[in-house]
């Protein structure tokens, strides 16, 4: 008799696989269904710091109370290829249950491996393309959440593609869901998550970081965006491009990051409220443009999409969060203390500050500031009471 594995009110599910395998599609569908079912959800997406390839992962955290943070713990890992296990091996514990196709994954390391032929379910439903639907259904079956919510979601999403596509997706979901329920019984997995009554649930929107930043930029009066595509900053570029006609936004896909930032500066000189989106590596190429904006008092908002802490600079495994953090504004001392500002998360706040002060504002979407902290040296004369710069020392 196996020991019952109980999970209560805080579940961490991670989907891992190669770039292009549909990790984001799976997570988006699962999060949408969970939210509609009344659960608290928080998703954190990781991208490799590479032009192409590498292993990506997305964590979906399901909780009984509202939580807005990532956790390293993995309760259930859906590995779509062997590379996902290698990539996430430092987070796999003996309590981690791994769902993967044994024809692709031979060893689960410290975790328990459950053979999960997701591709076979998709083929049985008519086409391997339905693998993502089957994977979502397995997760829902494992959690014991009714399949009806997923069926409604599939009908809504694929309504424009014909009844046959909808029917095949629902069939893939049925096969995956049945497997998930059987696996829960076979492995003696018990999941319990508190759900608020429908009448008492707060009316909240389910947004990813891309949509939140895009909405904030529009609310701030942004009318120009210039960017060179680089995940995950590309999402804001496409979000604003899709709504360019509705909000009179000029969209320029530049030939590189240097051109992107300088084009935005030119638009700013002409009176536009400009924004530039990029990622950690792209931002490094924009340093001269940022310096020019600083010295010329340009009103521009470069917005790197960075990950927790300093990980964006790592050459092989940079995690980039798709979630925001409460807005904070602070001065950046290097160069000219007080001449530039760092705004976290709220594009409207960033652009308003940029316009009021005629200064460039860096809008970072990150858990912690990307720049080192500096504190004024104890005993230094306050800046407003003397000429010259306040001495600063590095503090972390």
Image: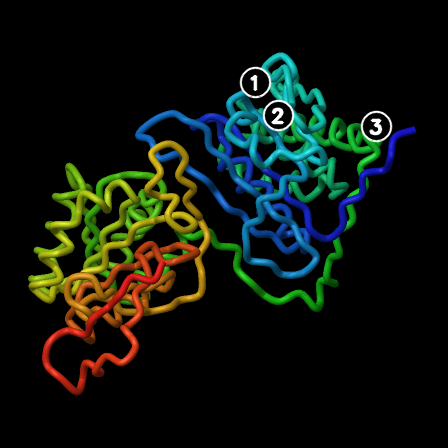
SS of the residue under disc 2: helix
Q: Which residue is mark 2?
A: 168
Closer to us: 6 or 273: 6
Residue found 61% across the figure and 30% down from its top:
78
In the picture, the quarter occupied by the N terminus is top right
Q: Quadrant of residue 110?
A: top right
Q: Which residue is mark 1?
A: 127
Q: From the top left corner, tell me how far across and down residue 93 is, in percent.
A: 66, 35
Q: Are marks 2 and 1 in contact (CB under 8 Å)?
A: yes
Disc assigned to residue 341 = none
Q: Residue furthest top?
A: 103
Residue 347 seen by the camera: no
Q: Dot 3, crowdedness within 10 Å: few (<14), some or many (≥20)? A: few
Q: From the top left corner, tell me how far across and down residue 227 is, in percent.
A: 22, 45
Label 3 and label 2: CA atoms lie apart by 27 Å
Q: Earlier in the sequence, mark 3 or mark 2?
A: 2
Disc assigned to residue 186 = 3
In the picture, the quarter occupied by the C terminus is bottom left
Residue found 31% across the figure and 42% down from its top:
234
Q: Are marks 1 and 3 in contact (CB under 8 Å)?
A: no
SS of the residue under disc 3: helix
Q: Quadrant of residue 202?
A: bottom right
Closer to us: 299 or 338: 338
Label 1 and label 3: CA atoms lie apart by 28 Å
Closer to us: 109 or 247: 109
Q: Quadrant of residue 390?
A: bottom left
SS of the residue under disc 1: loop
């Amino acid at each position: 008799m196996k020991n019952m594995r109980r999970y209560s009110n805080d579940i961490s599910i991670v989907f891992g696989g190669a770039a292009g395998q549909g990790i984001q599609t799976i997570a988006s569908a699962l999060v949408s269904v969970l939210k509609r079912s009344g659960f608290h959800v928080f998703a954190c997406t990781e991208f490799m710091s590479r032009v192409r390839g590498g292993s990506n992962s997305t964590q979906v955290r399901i909780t009984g109370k509202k939580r807005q943070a990532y956790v390293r713990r993995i309760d259930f890992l859906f590995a779509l290829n062997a590379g996902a296990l290698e990539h996430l091996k430092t987070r796999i514990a003996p309590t981690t249950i791994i769902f993967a196709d044994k024809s692709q994954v031979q060893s689960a390391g410290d975790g328990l491996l459950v053979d999960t032929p997701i591709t076979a379910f998709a083929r049985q439903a008519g086409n391997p393309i339905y693998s993502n639907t089957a994977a979502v259904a397995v997760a829902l079956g494992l959690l014991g959440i009714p399949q009806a919510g997923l069926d409604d979601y599939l009908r809504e999403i694929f309504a424009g593609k014909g009844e046959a596509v909808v029917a095949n997706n629902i069939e893939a979901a049925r096969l995956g869901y049945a497997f998930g329920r059987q696996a829960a019984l076979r492995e003696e997995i018990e999941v319990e998550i508190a759900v608020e009554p429908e009448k008492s649930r707060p009316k909240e929107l389910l947004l990813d970081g891309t949509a939140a930043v895009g909405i904030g930029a529009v609310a701030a009066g942004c009318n120009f965006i210039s960017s060179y595509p680089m995940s995950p900053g590309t999402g804001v570029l496409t979000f604003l491009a899709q709504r360019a006609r509705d909000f009179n936004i000029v969209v320029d896909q530049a030939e590189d990051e240097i051109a992107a930032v300088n084009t935005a500066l030119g638009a700013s000189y002409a009176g536009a409220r400009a924004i530039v989106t990029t990622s950690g590596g792209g931002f490094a190429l924009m340093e001269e443009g940022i310096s020019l904006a600083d010295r010329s008092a340009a009103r521009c908002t470069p917005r790197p999409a960075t990950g927790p802490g300093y990980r964006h600079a790592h050459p092989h495994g940079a995690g980039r969060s798709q979630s925001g953090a409460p807005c904070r504004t602070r001065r950046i001392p290097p160069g000219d203390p007080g001449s530039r500002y760092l705004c976290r998360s709220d594009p409207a706040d960033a652009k308003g500050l940029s316009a009021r002060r005629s200064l460039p504002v860096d809008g970072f979407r990150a858990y912690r500031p990307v720049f080192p902290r500096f504190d004024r040296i104890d005993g230094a004369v306050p800046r407003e009471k003397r000429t010259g710069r306040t001495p600063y020392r590095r503090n972390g």
